[in-house]
Amino acid sequence: METAATDNTPAFQFNKTWEELLDSSEFVQIFLSDVLEEYIVKQRWYAGKASKLKYIELAEFFKIQQKGEVYYGLILEVNFVEAFYQHYFLPIAFVTDDNFAQHDRILPIEINNQRGYIIDAANLEAFRKLVFERIATADPIDTTKVQYHKSHGFENKSYESSRFMGLEQSNTSLVYNEKYVLKFFRRIFADKNPDYEMSRFLSEKKGFRNTPSYLGSINLVDSENSNITIGLMQEMIPNEGDSWDYMLKELHKVFSNLEYKSIDIESLPNIDLYERLSIENIPPQIIDWAGLNLFLKVQTLAKRTAEMHIALGSEFEETAFTPEHYNGDYEVWLKNKMLYQFQNRLNTVENNMHKLDGLALDLAKEFLDKKNSIRKRFVDFDWTKLKGERIRIHGDYHLGQVLVENNDFYILDFEGEPESTIRDRKVKQPPLKDVAGLFRSFHYAIYATIFNNKDSYPSSQNNLFKGGEILYRYITGLFLGTYVTLTQNANLNLGYNQERIFILKYCLLEKAIYELGYELNSRPKWAVIPLKGISNIINH
């Protein structure tokens, strides 16, 4: 290697071909320490921003190639000062034309007297086309290091166009032919990604229609023989947006109706939390206030959720998906996980009390006063009393993971809980944990509507909160009534009634405590939402 002497030449020059470059230890050392450390921390998909980067190692590299075109896939091991590490996937290309290096330039470089740039290959149409063609022409069984797979639904497809899908946080999604989506997983794990496993299982094996169909994938067999998912190809669902945005619009209409229809919140009929309802059970005053359409949509979403769980709970061959009963191992795993998370959130609350006021401060004091009884609730999980089954679940189920199209709902993103290890994401859990995730999302949507439009509604904020809590009970009651009836009819064993309510409350408490840490750290004004959720459960 030579180092450049003038401003006009790249800082790094190597007398190697592109195909030989990664075999050069000198290049790899410079690339990892001088270049990538600075580049990676600026990427949206980089999940280590809260920690201090120590150094990067090249854990693995492999060629992504076809007919003489060669790109590299890098598996980067990012080591942190706090003594843990994360793995990331980065595809790279070498281009000599400035026009191809407008975005995500990683390094100006001269290779074998050719000046150019190393860039993130996802920016290059030629690379995107090659990946599409490798999946479209994949052999039924691929035993090479980089394994391409296609489903029966992806026969005889040819490349037309490709583009980035848009602003994503943790992955990079490419849209092909305006019909298909290839998701490149950026943060990766030494195992098959749950999104790949669940997508393939639900659409190929169970024919579940309300999720994007699995079309193909790219998996890497690494030096330790682990199977790592790099990419997942699915059909693109035409949609009107996600359920979170949809619900915010609908709820804005509901709260606007308070003034428009002169509704007195104090006189609205109320019900107990977790009471199972059908639409016929909802009082006319509530239907008049919120509108029938909202409840019909909640009913449809409950049906789709039940159908997803029925599909996931109806497998008796593939052991990764066969239902299991509760046992001592699961109880120990759950309690350890919960107590660790609870202690972490307790410390966060104690350290952030000064950021809170009003109702949020009162609820935070209640949380601290009742910490021993909350801890006891987590410890009181006794598997011997539970008769229901555990199955593979979505694991990070909320309104943002569900698309709306034509009065129907489509469920996406089965990667699981972001804070969990890959092994923990595959643990079979009560299906009601997904239901709890959605209930917390409904609760959030109600409060977010009040916060985002506080000047649009003439009622006081506390009065709006009261109305919101009444609405929450009817939404969740209808959801629960619809969901439990469908799952019982399909023989998915959720346990007896008291057991269902116990598990639902347990999972709601877990979810609200998980949310509390996020809110206190990033937007303390919203901490009232999980705190109110916790208060509902501990006082019910």
Image (cartoon, grey):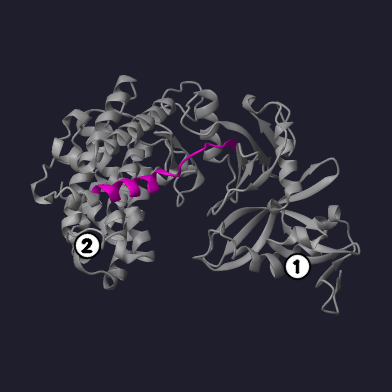
Would you call the spot at circle 1 few (<14 residues within 10 Å), some (14-19), or many (20 or more)? few
Q: Where is residue 124 in the image (x, y as percent from the top left)?
A: 73, 52
Q: Is mark 2 on a helix, strand or loop?
A: helix
Is 241 magenta? The answer is: yes
Q: What residue type is labelled 2?
A: Leu
Location of residue 406 in the rendering, given as x and y in whole percent from the top left corner: 43, 34
Residue farthest toward the front in the current orientation of the protein: 260
Q: How crowded is mark 2: few (under 14 residues within 10 Å), some or many (20 or more)?
A: few
Magenta stretch: give its range: 233-254
Q: In this view, does 483 lie to the left or right of 288?
A: right
Percent coordinates x, y for residue 160 in the rendering: 71, 38
Per the image, the residue denoted by label 1 is: 30
The mark that comes first in sequence, 2 or 1, is 1
The relative height of residue 52 versus residue 476 in the rendered view (above or below) is below
For the point 18% across and 35% down, the residue is 275
Answer whether residue 458 is magenta in the image: no
Quick one: SS at disc 1? helix
The amino acid type, in three-letter code, at marker 1 is Ile
101 relative to 502 in the view: left or right = right
Quadrant location of the N terminus in the rendered image = bottom right
Image: 264 above or below 316: below
Identify the residue at horizontal 71%, vertical 32% (top origin): 136
Furthest-left residue in view? 267
Question: Which of the two residues, 215 or 35, is positioned nearer the viewer here?
Answer: 215
Tell me which corner region of the image, top left, top right, bottom left or bottom right, holds residue 289.
top left
Left or right relative to 299: residue 312:
right
Distance from the alpha carbon under mark 2 to that under mark 1: 50 Å
Residue at numbered disc 2? 368
The spot of residue 374 in percent (x, y) is 23, 52
